[in-house]
Every structure is written in C-alpha cells, then in structure tokens.
Amino acid sequence: MSVKLPIYMDHAATTPCDPRVVEAMLPYFTKTFGNPGSRNHSFGWESEEAVDKARRQVASLIGADRKEVVFTSGSTEANNLAIKGAAVMYQKAPAGSDQCRGHIITANIEHKAVLDPCKRLQKDGFEVTYLEPGPDGIFTKEMVEGALREDTILVTLLWANNEIGTVNEIPEIGKLCHGKGIIFHTDATQWVGKMPTDVNEANVDLLSMSGHKMYGPKGVGALYVRRRRPRVRLVPLTEGGGQERGYRSGTLNVTGIVGLGKAAEIAMNEMKADGDRLLKFRQKVESEITSQLDTVQVNGHADKRLPHLTNISFGFVEGESLMMACKDIAMSSGSACTSASLEPSYVLKGLGIGDDLAHSSLRLSFGRLTTQEEVDYAIKTIVEAVNKLRVLSPLYDMHKEGIDISKIEWAAH
Amino acid sequence: MAYGEKVVDHYDHPRNVGNFGTTDEVKSRKDVGVGLVGAPECGDVMQLQIKVDEATGTIEDAKFKCFGCGSAIASSSLATEWLKGRSLDEGMAIKNTEIVEELSLPPVKIHCSVLAEDAIRAAIADYKEKNEPN
C-alpha cells in the first residue's frame, strides 16, 4: 500500500476542479469569448447560450426555474445580496428612523459570511436574534418559532454547518416561514451538490451556493431567488448594467458560470454514489478513532450530518501541535491560530464544548478523489500523533491521576 | 505557518520529557521544584520540574511536559536543556529573549518563550519555598 503525500482532506474548504469542468470551460476563454450582454452579434449570442445552459444546469440541481438563478462571485456575495437585499426591501421602517427597521433571525454558529452582514444590518437599525444550538448543533423549527416576532422579516440559517457538518431542519423551518410570510434564506454552500436539494419542497426563498465546494471553479456561485409564491424581491448591492435581472450588475463571468453549470450537472449524476462512498469513510474514521483513543468526541449530532465531513475533538492535546504531527494531511484545526492570541472555534464553543476541547479539534472532509488507503493512513497518523502528544501532555497526566482540570485555578495569560 | 528548523527538531525529538513523580509525590519532595504555568483555555500549559542537588545547590536534572503548540513544546524542551547543571541563580537569569533567539521564534510565538521563562521561575520559586527555613 502506498499513499501519495500530502493527502488532501479539506474538501469543505475547497475542492479540486473536476477535469470535465475544466474541459467545458476552456473554449470560453479564447474561442467563444463574447460578452453575453452583446445582443447584436453572434459572439454575444453564443456566450449567452452558454450562460443559459449553465443556468438550467444549476436550476435543475436545486429544483428551481432557470430564471430564479442569479450568478454571483460565490457564496459570500450571494449571502450579502440575500441578507442585505431582503432586509432593506422588506424593512418595516426607513433608514434613520427611531423605530426598529425589522427583525432578523440567524444563529451564533453561522458562517462569517452570514454573521457579518447581519452585524452590519444591526448597526443600520435592524434587530437580530442569534439562536444558540444545543449540544447536537441542530437548529429546529421550534427554535425558530420561539424567536419569531411581529416584525420578523427574515430568517437566515445554514443548510449544513461548515465546521461540523450538522444539518438543520430546513424544510420544516421553510414551511414555518412561508406560513408567516417571512422571507427564508439558507446558505447551502456545503449542502448543494452533495445532497438532493429541492427549493420548493424545502420552502426556501433564497439559497446561496458556491462553485468551488462542488468541484467547480473558484470565484463563481449563485443565489437562488424565488419568483413565485411568493415573488421575492431584493435591493441590489451592485448597480450598473442591470445584468442578472438587475440583482447583480457586471459582465458575466462566462467561463466560471460554464464551469459551475458543468459541476452542477456532474453533481446531479454522481452525488448519490459519492455520498455513499464518503459516508463509509466518515464512519470508519469515527469508529476507529473513538475505539483506539480515550477522551475523544465526535462533534455534532450523531446522524444528522453531512456524509463527507467529520469534526473530532481530542482531549488534552493542543490543536496546532496536533496539526504539526499530521503535517502530511491537509485538514482544518478547530483552533485558528492566526495571531498571538489563540482563538478556539466559535462554532464548537457555541455547542457548549469547553475551550480546552475546542482548541484541539480536527475537521476532516473527504471528496471525490479520496481513497480508502488515504483514509487508513489518516486514521493511523492521527492516532499516533495524539498518543505522542499525550505522552508530552501534563493535562493528560493529571487526568489519569484523577485531577479535575477545570477545578484548577489557571493563571490566564 | 512554517516552523523553524530548531523548533521542528525539539518537537520531533523533545528532550527530557517526564516528571519526578505524580502531582502528589512531587509536592512532598523537597529536592524537586515544580512550575506549572499557562491555562488550557489559552492553548498552552507548561509543567517544568527541577531536581536540585541539596549539597551544591545546582540543578542536576530537569523534566518537562507541555500542552501547547510546537513552539511551546520546543521552548520548554530547550529550557530543560539549559537548566541542567546551572545554579538556581543562573537558572533565574535565563531570559525569554534568549529562547526566542535560539529557536528563531516569530513574533506571534514570543508568548511561548515568555511562558517558558515563567515556568523556570515558578519551578525555582517552588523549590526555594519548600526549602525555606521554617
């Protein structure tokens, strides 16, 4: 058995472009390079046709009509457009008035690309409720129901969480929102292309998705904007040539859009087989690691999680040194050590996981090219690394001596 | 982030890992000084133990354990190497800047060296306290 190093196990961060996607894109760089906005010559028409095909491919992946797809630069832009655009369109009071402009419901473990637009809106006179999850990380209809107000205009929740892979009760929450006439947005970046998606069954009004999380190119994504029952309208962020029904002005990224469309088509055909295969990898990693090591914890709900992603906390070892010991495996650590002050993951903390465990978690996410050999290598490497670091860890000694670490008065530094 | 060569060397081959007994055992040993600094929620905990020759007052052995990043492990590993054979006063004179220099720590990792210095001071202080007359 030979494994080519380093191993890529960070598909929730980004995926490689599928070669079939690249092949589909290539002609649109040099041959069919026209601006789809050019209405009076064949160069423009051909590009427009390519964009239209991609629009149908994307729409069919999520059960939408092609006219409901607005191409963007990715999920971050789609989230910004959806959240800010809907808030301002459906506001209860104008900017600058003393009244609350409207109430928005989201969650404290959302992606930053949802949280930061919400914080911006708070500064601008909207009120935002940040739901807090239970230990399983799932947001339910009841949780949203409990936070509803007379002036609630928008609910925005991830379909599947990017750090722990937990899947929220999106169809149930969608139904609740539709019953109350509240706009419902979901950031489905980690979900779409991996799991069957139907915006009508799920009663979703706005849905964000991204190309590079599903084997498409980076820099392209889409926002689904419902046109019927109800017809959702948004105030655009970008104004100019009026492309994308006026929601997103700017010359279309034709190559990227063609790539996104092709990636959507491939995902339609292969998600079932991919998902089944990757779920087996996830189950093997989780069962092997929890049986070979003590004091480890798989984060999030036991079953309601994405098939290809697992997040595991290891007691008494520190995340960065754990990553260092697994340097041949590309994965994410729960602690993002970007500055002198280590910040444990706010998502894991949001689940009520202690700072010490939140500091020492790994997110592994598998993809289309992941092999059984790579999975076995990862298990072996992680188990050895944790064992090595526990020999070094004063906290593990204390644990074995029966000392409760949380009872010690540590001097924070 | 890329680590310096010496950090990687200490991380791969940490020197003097261990202790001179369980938490309770070392508490009652007069020839051992223990320094435990840092906090789990900050991502670094260092435990440094020194064994002192009572006749000469020199540190004859030093052991460490560390919960922390590679630089924290390297800083405490290096500290044990430097402490061996020194007098208590010479041990107290070790500065975090010397550790930074020796390991080529980048600015974001300077706190690891500070923690190592704290651990040295705490271990020596513990020894002195245990051996104070009355």
Image: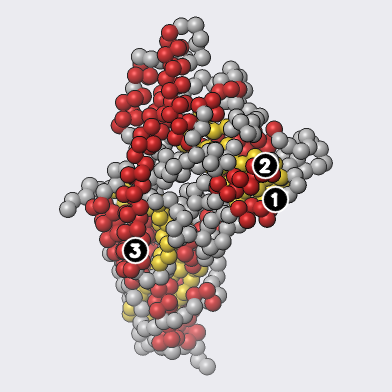
Mark 2, residue position: A182
The residue that appears at 32% across and 51% down in the rendered structure is A329
Callout 2: SS? loop
Viewer-nearest of labels 3 and 1?
Answer: 1
Compute the Cα span from label 3 to label 1: 40 Å
Please say whether residue A281 is visible from this viewpoint.
yes
Crowd around label 3: few <14 · some 14–19 · many ≥20 (10 Å): few
Q: Residue furthest top?
A: A40
Foreground of the two, A201 or A129 = A201
Please say whether residue B109 is visible from this viewpoint.
no
Asked if badge 2 and badge 1 are on a common chain, one would say yes
Foreground of the two, B49 or A242 = A242
Compute the Cα span from label 2 to label 1: 10 Å
Task: Look at the picture and state if A84 lies above or below A251.
Answer: below
Mark 1, residue position: A148
Mark 3, residue position: A287
Which quarter of the picture shows residue A375? bottom left
The residue that appears at 54% across and 25% down in the rendered structure is A67
Callout 3: SS? helix
Whichever of callouts 3 and 1 sits on the residue coming sooner in the sequence is 1
Task: Look at the picture and state if A47 lies above or below A292.
Answer: above
Crowd around label 1: few <14 · some 14–19 · many ≥20 (10 Å): some
The residue that appears at 58% across and 17% down in the rendered structure is A241
- In the image, taking residue A11 as reference, residue A342 lies left or right, namely right
Compute the Cα span from label 3 to label 2: 42 Å
Q: Which amino acid is tagged 3?
A: Ser
